[in-house]
Amino acid sequence: MENNKNNERINRIINNLHVKTAYRNKYKKSCISTRMKELHTPGISITVIDKGRIAWTKGFGVKEYGNTESVNNDTMFLAGSISKPVFALAVMKLKEKGIIDLDTDINNYLKRWKIPKVNYWQPKITLRQILSHTAGLTIHGFEGYLQTEKLPSTPQILSGEYPANTKEVVVNTLPGIKYRYSGGGTTIAQLAVEDLLGKPFPQIMNEELFQPLKIENSTYEQYLPSSRLNQIATGYFEKNQEVNGGHYVYPEMVAAGLWTTSNDLAKIIIEIQNALKGKSDYLKRETVEEMLTPQKIAPFMGISFFLDGTNNERFSHTGCDHGFVAHLISYKNDSKGAVILVNSNEGTPIIEEIFMAIAEEYNWIDYFPKERNNVKINSKMINQYIGDYKSDSDIKIKIFSEKQTLYLKVNKQDPIVLSSVDSENFYIDILNTNIKFKITKEKEVKGLTIIQDGVRIDAKKL
């Protein structure tokens, strides 16, 4: 009976993809098979979490073009930057054990490489700053390496030395002051944990996270054992162009090197959800609460997870490597979520299209952008808006009223209805346009600003 219900839900989801249009909150519907063809995406793996457990996992398409082997529950994809929060979870466990401190100068843990001085000044960087991308460090992301290329050591990567294909990782803004995403920073964290524990990084992650959580199909190994090779998907760029060798190698393992399944990532999410309820044997509630607490410098960031939704109810992360795209979304208290893995860079849009279908089917709270209510404006105030306006670039704007409804006319365009958020802020429901009136304390309208696609046009009332 449960399987039948799940199958019905799956069918509704895969036939109800929400494809964005040029207009806000307007979507056209499509199905997964059509979108996979349009976006040249051979394979997708989806796992949905509901009521604090895995509701279902399902693969769509094939691991590789020209091969009939289907994506299944054990198919492994590169997870890109989702490697970061998975690593951060292990760091939080090491913190619980008293092995590591998030607020200690990371140079105290580093042995083979140190945070470079900037001229005479020695920056002090912490793991908390690195994992919340507030350390002022450079290098956003990494290109990876062909499987046939010589790989640099982690110190060589951080120093920008051959055979590394990126520049050195340095501090070039004040630490702890602003958010700036840095894969370079998380590579420093990788080296620090290796130096502290004296073990290869994949072994550390296996011992500290994967084995305790019985995660069987995830690894940070970059040269996979032969027993794993039949599990992995082949990566594609655009137009069915296969990644050289099927996938790149990422010695920057924390930044981009995790091989995993959607099912394994869902298990990790559920462990976090359980910890928040005090029901995890792996992590304490206060540990996960700290991980998912907004950082003062970057209120949309926790420890490696991005936070959004009302009261930061959702935590999430995306990932992108050559040929692979990944995304996970989870609710803290509602015990819902989903993981989607794709083996095509061109397939990036389909991920959000599937998420919206899942959100609609499982009634995800506060996921879709809220519809704006048209607030009724006091009739006395309406007269204040009416008049002619002109911008410095000679755009002529007219505001007039009919039957207590305001209209905007720009140059020779036909008039268009204005809807109101409040007495100062208006919008055009059928276009992606906002209007903000400039109102004095005496309730006089002196001008307006039209905002479209981030572009502002200021106009004075004549």
Image (spheres, helix red, strand yellow):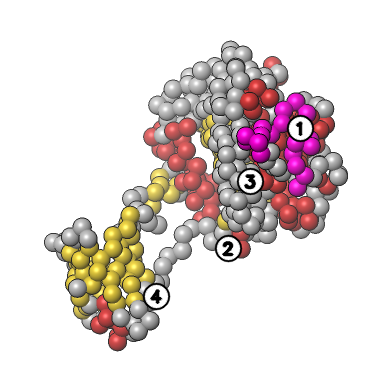
> Which segment is the magenta one?
103-121
Q: Is residue 15 magenta?
A: no
Tell me the residue that label 3 is attached to: 175
Q: Earlier in the sequence, mark 3 or mark 2?
A: 3
Q: Earlier in the sequence, mark 2 or mark 1?
A: 1
Tell me the residue that label 2 is attached to: 310
Residue at the farthest front position = 120
CB within 8 Å, label 2 to label 1: no
| The one of 433 and 351 positioned closer to us in this rendering | 433
Does residue 107 appear left or right of residue 440 in this picture? right
Gap in angstroms between the C-alphas marked 4 and 3: 40 Å
Find residue 422 and name its label: 4
- Which is the main secondary structure of the residues drawn in magenta? loop
- Neighbor class of circle 4 (other Cα within 10 Å; few <14, some 14-19, many 20+) is few
For badge 4, the amino acid type reads Asp
Count of marks, rendered view: 4
Residue at the farthest bottom position = 380
- State which quadrant residue 422 falls in: bottom left
For badge 1, the amino acid type reads Leu
Q: Earlier in the sequence, mark 3 or mark 1?
A: 1
Q: Earlier in the sequence, mark 4 or mark 2?
A: 2
Residue located at (66% from left, 36% from top)? 120
CB within 8 Å, label 1 to label 4: no
Residue located at (43% from left, 24% from top)? 240
Q: Earlier in the sequence, mark 1 or mark 4?
A: 1
Gap in angstroms between the C-alphas marked 1 and 4: 55 Å
Gap in angstroms between the C-alphas marked 2 and 1: 39 Å
Gap in angstroms between the C-alphas marked 3 and 2: 29 Å
Tell me the residue that label 1 is attached to: 110
